[in-house]
Amino acid sequence: MNTINKHNWKSKIHEIIYEADTPSGKLFDVLLLVFILLSIVLVMLESVASVDEKYHQILYIGEWVVTILFSIEYILRIISVKKPLKYMFSFFGVIDFLSTIPMYLAFIFAGSQALVTLRALRLLRVFRILKLARYLGASNQLKDSIIASRVKIFVFLFAVIVSSIIFGTIMYLVEGEANGFDNIPKSVYWCIVTLTTVGFGDIAPQTALGQFITTFIMILGYGIIAVPTGIVSAEYAKSSRKADLEKEALLHSSNNHNAQNDNNNTAVDLNSQHCPNCGVSNHKDDSNFCYKCGYKLHL
Amino acid sequence: MNTINKHNWKSKIHEIIYEADTPSGKLFDVLLLVFILLSIVLVMLESVASVDEKYHQILYIGEWVVTILFSIEYILRIISVKKPLKYMFSFFGVIDFLSTIPMYLAFIFAGSQALVTLRALRLLRVFRILKLARYLGASNQLKDSIIASRVKIFVFLFAVIVSSIIFGTIMYLVEGEANGFDNIPKSVYWCIVTLTTVGFGDIAPQTALGQFITTFIMILGYGIIAVPTGIVSAEYAKSSRKADLEKEALLHSSNNHNAQNDNNNTAVDLNSQHCPNCGVSNHKDDSNFCYKCGYKLHL
Amino acid sequence: MNTINKHNWKSKIHEIIYEADTPSGKLFDVLLLVFILLSIVLVMLESVASVDEKYHQILYIGEWVVTILFSIEYILRIISVKKPLKYMFSFFGVIDFLSTIPMYLAFIFAGSQALVTLRALRLLRVFRILKLARYLGASNQLKDSIIASRVKIFVFLFAVIVSSIIFGTIMYLVEGEANGFDNIPKSVYWCIVTLTTVGFGDIAPQTALGQFITTFIMILGYGIIAVPTGIVSAEYAKSSRKADLEKEALLHSSNNHNAQNDNNNTAVDLNSQHCPNCGVSNHKDDSNFCYKCGYKLHL
Amino acid sequence: MNTINKHNWKSKIHEIIYEADTPSGKLFDVLLLVFILLSIVLVMLESVASVDEKYHQILYIGEWVVTILFSIEYILRIISVKKPLKYMFSFFGVIDFLSTIPMYLAFIFAGSQALVTLRALRLLRVFRILKLARYLGASNQLKDSIIASRVKIFVFLFAVIVSSIIFGTIMYLVEGEANGFDNIPKSVYWCIVTLTTVGFGDIAPQTALGQFITTFIMILGYGIIAVPTGIVSAEYAKSSRKADLEKEALLHSSNNHNAQNDNNNTAVDLNSQHCPNCGVSNHKDDSNFCYKCGYKLHL
């Protein structure tokens, strides 16, 4: 009885922490997002000298509150998962650990300044919440169109970088150190600043020839921005049209059981459950057992 | 007789002020737009020290003219509408009041400087005129495509902000206070300046590593601008295609009375009448009575 | 005989100068483009102090050569056209006159500095050559898609300007004169600089609140650039699809005489002839007589 | 026997160096890319004064290693090709020679500074590797859509440049030398900086009128960026749709031998073999003999 109870207790925690399909799981995710954002705000405010001077005590307490809550969450994550070691050495496991530890280290050792790097890692925890984005039903189509145009965008970026190196070297030879183009890497950096139409203006061509070449670089940059936009635009339109056709096909076959099954397979997304045994996620929404280890899932 | 007369007088004013379908209503809206823009120009010019010195008297008189005209309009709005309180506490009612009051306050109290804030609120009155845009027949399709891509744009902006926070923190650690990256919020601000390709240049990376990371941020920004453009582009094309199909369908069924009725319902837009009784707007163009309170509308 | 000869001589000149369909007409247009560009280069170089000092004599002679050639062209244009007054007071007639006169004025009066304005008007003559662009077969579709999205782009620009005025006023109140936001017009100017992602950086927010609001402005600007792009993109795709369908339809009906007639009407563009009598252009390619005054055209 | 052996040895080298279809050819191309990038990094680092001071010896050795390897490659290219002179005076032959020679020249003559220009030419060798891009199967469609919109983009760029000259001249007249608009060419340069939304800020309008005109320039630039994007977007969508239709057509006719032959002709790309005899490339994948000189190709 006790073991079953304990098991139930553990599996309940697992459900809350690792899944986002149940009300309590959703609530947990939203709360976690709030605390992550709060912890990021704390790191930010602490870096502002004037704020830190005034509210140092409050920030310090807030930091400890966040640290303790993150510690509890970390311990619960380890307890509730079947294979704790696998979690601990997973990407998010390491991030969770590193974003919890800084305050303890600062307590033991002096010089917390260097630990700001570690605390900034908390930002990466935000990506854990991105599974929430799935419920917005939007990111998938977006992701698909970006993935579909991945190779083309890579080829495009390669062309941008090669152009930048060539024009950067030319500008270094034309303008020289006297006008701020100290060396080729800096010239290439300036060239990318110009090509992407950012244009800081900390370095700017001074010679007539340099300004003439810059004109070419700018118009090139202004023109080629059309390329990735055109690609994503077309790919997105394609995937969007496909999604519409699928929806339509479903509407026309709603009294056909087989078609409806297809419906479940193609239209309904994978859910956010993590297997309590092996930690694998992305199960199909109607799965009863983990597709990897066969362990019974919460329905 | 007198009441009917009075009622007619009131309803005439209502028609002029609140509707944009009659010639007099249109004229009123255009005149109002001119006066709103004039009042904005006055606020602007008064803020220019050199102009204010020279033409202070003229600006002061102009300001009073605008204030008095706005006051008359405000009073007429209250008189001609059936439920004055509902209007007075509506969004535009409050804006109308606040954009009229500053000069009276400045007359009673000294120190009109602080009142510039109130007078700037007049700008919001411009949106009242946006109902004119409906006659351009353009804003609806535009609005539809933006609304259709709302969620996707939100997801995109979330990604932009998370990236900015991460890169901002990294730049703070790399460049430090010595190079203008005083604290993390400022670093994040700089990162958004760079990612959106604005590039003021008041803060710019000085270290080689910082410039290298900046290169990534800029290319990222240059690349991801393709995403919202692609989305709006595809959504707009979709809604545009739908509109075309609807138009075509109407053309093919012009000798069918029922279809023609559909025509009126889908193609003819809602008009700009406000019910003189309850103030509800967006009535169908062939409505005889308010769809909410049944009050007779002007045809 | 003499009158006929004279007429032939005149009509020959008319053909060369006003039309671009004959080899000699094309040659004239290309030569004219070269001389216009040369005259622009002269105006440009003269404004560069170091070049003007060195090569003043050459520039002066070049300027006189251009002026005399333009004078001859202007006289020939008046002689060869049937209604000289109509030409002289047309847009291009005035431009032609104004771009020829400066050197004569400088010869009579001293102080040619003020005449640079007049000489710069020569640039507008370039648009005369744009009729050449028709032969590239590209500008029409482009023009169509811009015209089709004209109203929508106007609504969009109105929204951009209203947003800039609102945000500009807010930034003036937040940052104030101390940080370079001297007055509301300058603030609005800065706001447009930021919203369009130009970002000169001569004015930049200094307060934390100002930088926070700037973040919103930039992301707004980064986002709404998607709107005109999406519009033009969709309109262009539509007009491009329509053009393709028309081409296809023509290919499928090549043995049908009526359809082929349609072919001539829709696919063959209007030509660049100007009527030697009334000066009207844009005649259909197979016109024998001016569609306006019935005067015989050169075939 | 010996000649055959020698021929085999030569043709083996030819296969490795000039082709990218065999494993050894691919390996060679990847190694070459690495060495080209390494040589570029060396040129870059040498231009950084602080790095050059510290690691001058290492950079010098690295430079010699790269030079010797490039020399060997150059000699092998000459030996293994049938018509060495044709290669030596081809574009890439000259680039290969010029990017190898600088160190030898620096060894003979003093003053290697001027030779940095020659060494920078190595960058152009990167384009040799672009044949690798073909294997990404992406660049073709991209190239097609850019070529299809070539004329339109040219018309667009012409319009941008004419606008820039006009606005640049106006700004020169409005702002004058006192505010940094020294001469018309510089004004035009500034105008392109603004129109392309780069906005360095080294020159910025100071007068109210100048800032007002700048507002127009910026909004114009912000608006017309939509044009090339719309064009490429639509053309890309068109070519992408065409490619999809072709793929589909092939799928529907897979049991038809003739159709399958079409398949080979349209879908399978040309391969990267260079004829060992005449050096012509772009042979069809199933070619046994060079389509130009009939020389037997390696299969």
Image (tube, coloured by chain):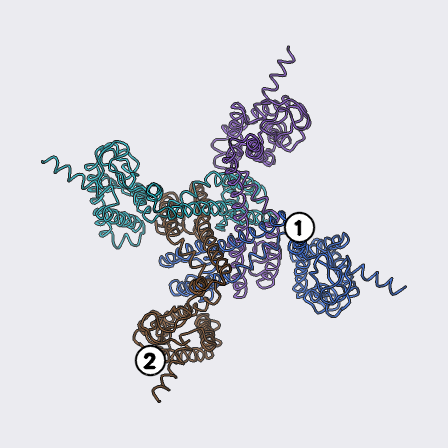
Chain colours: A purple, B cyan, C brown, D blue
Mark 1, other Cα within 10 Å: few <14 / some 14–19 / many ≥20 = few
Q: Which mark is residue A117?
A: none
Is residue C177 something one can see in this rendering?
no
> In terms of depth relative to the viewer, which is nearer, A183 or A190?
A190
- Residue B32 horizontal/vertical position (percent): 25, 47
SS for dot 2? helix
Q: Quadrant of the N terminus of chain D?
A: bottom right
- Residue D144 horizontal/vertical position (percent): 58, 57
Residue C295 to residue D12: above or below: below
> In terms of depth relative to the viewer, which is nearer, B250 or A152?
B250
- Amino acid found under the numbered disc labelled 2: Ile
Of badges 2 and 1, nearer the viewer stands 1
Left or right, B256 with reference to B230: left
Extreme residue toward the top, this view: A1
The answer as to whether the residues below labels 2 and 1 share one chain is: no
Find out whether the residues at labels 2 and 1 contact each other: C-beta distance under 8 Å: no
Mark 2, other Cα within 10 Å: few <14 / some 14–19 / many ≥20 = few
Residue of label 1: D256
Q: Quadrant of the C terminus of chain D?
A: bottom right
Chain of the residue displaying label 2 = C
Q: Residue at x 73, y 54 (%)?
A: D21
Q: Residue at x 40, y 81 (%)?
A: C12
Residue of label 2: C108
- Residue B86 horizontal/vertical position (percent): 26, 32
Is residue B86 something one can see in this rendering?
yes
Residue C37 to residue A137: above or below: below
How far apart are the alpha carbons under marks 2 and 1? 85 Å
Residue B287 to residue A153: above or below: above
In which quarter of the view is residue A287 placed? Answer: top right
